[in-house]
Amino acid sequence: MTRHLRFILIAFAVLSTAAAPEPIQRFPKPDFESGYERPIMQTPASRALTLEYLDVVVLIAALSLASYFVLKKRSRRYLFVLMLFSLIYFGFWRKGCVCSVGSVQNVVLAMFSNSYAIPLTVVAFFLLPLVFTLFFGRTFCAAVCPLGAAQDIFILKPKSLPGWLNETLSLIPYLYLGLSVLFAATGAGFLICRYDPFVGFFRFGASFDMILFGAFLLLLGTVVARPYCRFLCPYGVLLNWMSQLSRKHLSITPAECINCRLCEASCPFDAIKMPTAKSNEKKEQNTRRLALLLVLTPLVMALSGWAGSLLHVPLSRGHFTVALAEEIRLEDTGQRTERTDETDVFRATGKSTALLYEEARQIQRQFRTGGWLLGGFLGLIFCLKMIKLAIPSEQSLYEANRGTCLSCGRCLSYCPVGKEGVDVERIPQG
Amino acid sequence: MAESKNDRILTILVIFFSVAGMIYFGLSAVRSDGKKTAGNPFHYDIENFKKDGADLRTYKEVKAVPLTLLAPHAIAVDLRDRIYVTSGASVVRIDAAGQMSVSTTVTDEINAIAVSADGDIYLALRTAVEVLDSTGTRTASWQIPDQAVLTSVAVAGRDVYLADAGNRVVWRYDLQGTLLNKIGERDEARDIVGFLIPSPYFDVAIDPDGFLWAVNTGRHQFENYFPDGALRSSWSNSSMAIDGFSGCCNPAHIAILSDGSFVTSEKGILRIKVHKQIGALEAVVATADQFDPKTSSLEVTVDSRDQILVLDPQRAQVRIFQKKEDPP
Amino acid sequence: MSLKTRRDFLKSGVNTAVALAMGGAAGFVVGKSGKGDLVWQLDPNICIQCENCATNCVLPESAVKCVHSYSMCGYCDLCSGYLEPGAKSRDTGAENQLCPTGAIKRTFIEDPYFEYEIDEKLCIGCGKCIKGCGAFGNGSLYLQVKHDRCVNCNECSIARSCPSNAFRRVPAETPYILRGEEADRYSAQI
């Protein structure tokens, strides 16, 4: 009797939670006279939590070693070996997930969603590289990030890009970051992961388009060093900010720069600040331009914010609910006759379309607010860049650009200055 | 100098080529995002089965009696064509005008209902039988031994037959609740294969001669018994085609018309058909496209004019079907 | 104080401020975090067997496989998850099998019962058998993400293309959504 009662309860539980078609709790069971016993279903466990924690430990170790190699050891060779290790461990072994770049979205989702409990390991993957960068510069990019490593080994004949192009392209990551945050915050999905060009190589499988996109990106990387890191990576934006404020940072020379120009062409990323000629512009002129830019900034921000808010309709189509509501509307108004799986499922649930439309409208409102913020943010970034260009830099020595320098250590060996003084042998004659 | 010029051209070519490739495949990736790949080789369209037999339909729906009950479960009709419907532990009687006349609630959920020629109401609960008179007053009740799960009840003369999916037998009781005998246990000497009941669907009905028919759903077999439990006859037809029964356990419900042919109701792909007493398909009454998605199973019964009453739990209706040529 | 050192001082101040702010942000996020990890799983009660699982996994061989709750199986001879509709005979002939890869093994137990077992190496997760079993049978066959195969992408590519939104993140300690007694046994294990 109790056995049956239990069945009833299970059957009830199964039936009450089920959608169509309802699974029927087998009842009663066949009586096997031959002594047959039902096999047990295999449910292999997911990856152990201890292994996830091990990943964090490896991350900390790799970040520490990278910082040590950059700042103390000053060795490109050690960095390169560590970079290969990271490529194998975080890339091919861990299949590129979860990576710090993508973790931005998890953090944003956790902030905006009440149902998503972000795993601690993901928080660690997000924060640790930022913290290390705040102290030691972008050593994460140098030798820990598997995406960076994958591109780094393809740098064959790096060419310097014109300054204007470099500056323009480096605005893309802000856009990418902004869009990714908007999508993650509204629950529309993880753009960074969806369009990760290299994860397909790590897993030996991805969509055909993304594999080829990655392949062409690597091909581009043979002449334009690390194109993803410099002109796409959204996490790079945060690292750039942290690195500009970092306590310590890679210095090209271990002692005093003697302006020998040897390192000038050593950086494949155009991240060495060169000494600038003394500007002969009048100070007044400069100030006026700066003042104009400062006045224009709020205007630009408002304008781009407005432009961003106009995009909320097409952008919100990236959200499942909005896309579904749109399809339902097309079908209901007879503009489309062919039904999709999505709309079939929705109609089978018996939920009212009014409710769906309301949900979709709410998400669109979120996208409109997000569009304002995103547009304003991009406007601000653009203006800041202009302001930075307007302020004459007073550069007298060769120095790493703290924001864009990836701490790869390539320039180190070019510097003839040793801790004890200048190695005259290494200065070319003539 | 020439070499560096070549170098430059090569660089520009590589940049141009790779940027073009990136843009092409990047856009293509964005466009194809989340879309189903075309031409799925594994597509299995069961929608087609739902239309099976639609062209053979010779019945039409003449009426749908709305019910004010939540999740109606079982249905019966008495000799005066009044409809009895159960829902949870309640039973209601609906007269021809759609007026609800009797409403009674018993102790437990009702699995099946039958009405005797005298107008007494027999309710099969999970492990017990409750008998009510025509006013809804309880006159008798008894428990079923062992691990019973009653799924159907039928009254023939002085006998009450109870289909028990738990013990996989049909119990024969008299009207007062005295156990007379068990029917349908595996017995090779009497050519009884035993009931194979893979899910809680196991129906019994009485034919015009007063003999018991039970559905051996797991074998898609109809079995006809003498009151003492001897097998009188049987037929089966397992097939995915319209003239047979398929799936784990079908037909889920049956009723018997005045000429002895069967009204069968299948779950899975919902359909209602009429089979001759010897098994051949006689008519298609209703096919899956006439029912809402998520409809679980349809209990059927027949009235004195051989109209077929289908209890549609999804729409909470009693849907009445009639031969197309019959007068309304 | 020279310009350089003043700037350095300012920078170090901002650095400390950012470090503190990050600590605060970290505290906020950690407050919203769960203890364990999350993995992807599909809810078989929402799944509509659209066949995307077979083709949309990032892995060359999908991590989604058919599983079998034996406790719910009718052990039927005429198994609608195994046999092609209109199959000429009820046997293991390839032409009678519904599964495109022949991944279901049919074994005679005793009259009238047959056991059906999924050969995971052959199963591609297309859900064809599940459609058959669910439409006509007990629904003992259903799809699950197998966690010895799944690489747990941050954004699951099948989840993205799932028309019924059947995929969701579940705690890594209980990474399956099972049916029948298997569900019971599974929750008892945990």
Image: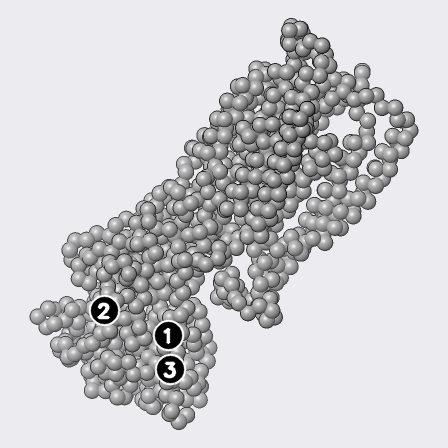
Chain to which the residue tagged by mark 2 belongs: B
Instruction: Name the front one of labels 2 and 1.
Output: 1
Q: Position of residue A354 (x, y in %)?
A: 60, 66
Per the image, the residue denoted by label 2 is B219
What amino acid is found at the position of numbered circle 2 in the picture? Arg
Q: Earlier in the sequence, mark 1 or mark 3?
A: 1
Disc 1 is placed on an element classified as: loop
Q: Which of marks 2 and 1 is nearer the N terminus?
A: 1
Q: How many other residues sit within 10 Å of disc 3, few (<14), some (14-19) or many (≥20)? A: some
Q: Where is residue B21 in the image (x, y as percent from the top left)?
A: 59, 43
Instruction: Name the front one of labels 3 and 2.
Output: 3
Relative to the observer, which residue lies in front, B291 or A16? B291
The answer to whether marks 2 and 1 sit on the same chain is yes
What amino acid is found at the position of numbered circle 1 in the picture? Asp
Per the image, the residue denoted by label 3 is B57
Q: In the displayed image of the protein, which residue is found farthest to the front? A: B2
Q: In this view, does A135 lie above or below B218?
A: above
Q: In the displayed image of the protein, which residue is found farthest to the bottom? A: B327
Query: What is the quadrant of the N terminus of chain B in the image?
Result: top right
Per the image, the residue denoted by label 1 is B52
Q: Quadrant of residue A214?
A: top right
Instruction: Say if residue B195 shows up in the picture.
Output: yes
Disc 1 to disc 3, C-alpha distance: 10 Å
Instruction: Say if residue A17 shows up in the picture.
Output: no
Q: Where is residue B133 in the image (x, y as percent from the top left)?
A: 31, 83
What amino acid is found at the position of numbered circle 3 in the picture? Arg
Disc 2 to disc 1, C-alpha distance: 22 Å
Q: Quadrant of residue B85?
A: bottom left
